[in-house]
């Protein structure tokens, strides 16, 4: 195994912390480079060479000839393929591996985009569009119910252990309240799973990259959320295509 030397381009959003959590879980040394949304750094030519899609997260693996990887699900798989020889987060067994990849696709193609749109229409859209709010909030809850069902009688989604299947959806479900789903009490398996994953030391470390986590505070003091959303609206030029 090559000695890892990785730069993570990130912001403390659910997609960004997916990667710092995996890096911490695998004990991979890395440098976090915070990207300024306010200055639209993610759209600058130097960054587009790393991620042509102009979004975080992305990584550069200096130990492998400055190889760049974008799209959070692809980054998680890349890190495991190169730096998880024991298959801790991405099992070696082909059936278990397939199951983990299925949940990765579920998050990347379903939960992320749908919850992102729910958040946008509930919180950030310049006009309130009831149809869009209902459509994306209902779909987010439906996807939560899929996860809740899959967790019935189980602690983790695949193979009775924590894997990328859990790591990829956890940061999104954790901030359900940002997206207009005020509570996940109706999904008890999911709620217990969030608490279980939150208690992992590597997860706590990863959640605080590149800046101290602010979302736990909103869970404890929901009134502070409105102020945060107002600041985010002012400091970021939200576009209709943003996932988040
Ligand atoms: N599918 C992408 C989504 C990435 C994404 O939407 N990133 C957001 C932050 S969570 C972003 O960079 N937004 C800024 C922009 O679009 O300019 C992934 O999973 O990596």
Image (cartoon, grey):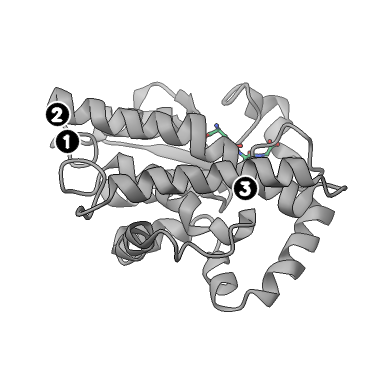
Q: Which residue is mark 1?
A: 87
Q: Are marks 2 and 1 in contact (CB under 8 Å)?
A: yes
Which residue is denoted by mark 3 in the rendering?
137
Distance CA(mark 2)–CA(mark 3) = 36 Å
State the residue at coordinates (48%, 41%).
Answer: 8
Q: What kind of element bears circle 1?
A: loop
Q: Quadrant of ligand 1?
A: top right
Q: Give the SS element for disc 2.
A: loop
Per the rendering, the mark at residue 92 is: 2
Q: Are marks 1 and 3 in contact (CB under 8 Å)?
A: no
Mark closer to the chain start, 1 or 3: 1
Locate the N terminus and report the quarter of the image it occupies: top left
Query: Dot 2: within a 10 Å radius of its alpha carbon, few (fewer than 14), some, or many (20 or more) residues?
Result: some
- Secondary structure under tag 3 reads helix
Indicate if the residue with disc 3 has its beta carbon within 8 Å of ligand 1.
Answer: no
Residue 16 in view (yes/no): no
Q: Earlier in the sequence, mark 2 or mark 1?
A: 1
Residue at the location (13% across, 37% down)? 86
In space, the residues marked 2 and 1 are separated at their CA atoms by 5 Å
Mark 1, residues whose alpha carbon is within 10 Å: few (<14), some, or many (≥20)? some
Give the Cα distance between marks 1 and 3: 35 Å
Q: Residue at x 54, y 77 (%)?
A: 220
Q: Would you identify the image quadrant in which residue 42 lies?
A: top right
4 or 145: nearer the viewer: 145
Q: Is residue 95 above or below residue 200?
A: above
Q: Nearer the viewer, residue 83 or 14?
A: 14
Q: Earlier in the sequence, mark 2 or mark 3?
A: 2
Q: Which mark is residue 198?
A: none
Along the line of sight, the residue nearer the viewer: 163 or 8: 163
């Amino acid at each position: 195994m090559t000695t890892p030397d990785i730069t993570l381009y990130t912001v403390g959003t659910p997609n960004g912390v997916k990667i710092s959590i995996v890096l911490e879980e695998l004990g991979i040394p890395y440098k976090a480079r915070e990207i300024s949304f306010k200055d639209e750094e993610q759209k600058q030519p130097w960054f587009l060479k790393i991620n042509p899609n102009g979004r975080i997260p992305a990584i550069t693996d200096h130990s492998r000839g400055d190889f760049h990887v974008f799209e959070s699900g692809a980054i998680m798989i890349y890190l495991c393929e190169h730096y998880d020889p024991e298959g801790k987060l991405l099992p070696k067994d082909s059936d278990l591996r397939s199951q983990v990849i299925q949940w990765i696709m579920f998050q990347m193609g379903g939960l992320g985009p749908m919850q992102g749109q729910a958040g946008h229409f509930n919180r950030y859209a310049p006009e309130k569009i009831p149809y869009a709010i209902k459509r994306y909030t209902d779909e987010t809850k439906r996807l939560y119910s899929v996860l809740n069902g899959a967790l019935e009688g189980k602690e983790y989604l695949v193979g009775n252990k924590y894997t990328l299947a859990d790591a990829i959806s956890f940061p999104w479900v954790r901030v359900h309240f940002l997206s207009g789903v005020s509570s996940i009490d109706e999904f008890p398996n999911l709620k217990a799973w969030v608490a279980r994953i939150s208690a992992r030391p590597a997860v706590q470390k990863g959640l605080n990259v590149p800046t101290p986590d602010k979302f736990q505070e909103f869970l404890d003091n929901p009134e502070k959320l409105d102020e945060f959303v107002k600041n985010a609206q002012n400091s970021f030029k939200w576009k209709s295509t943003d996932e988040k």
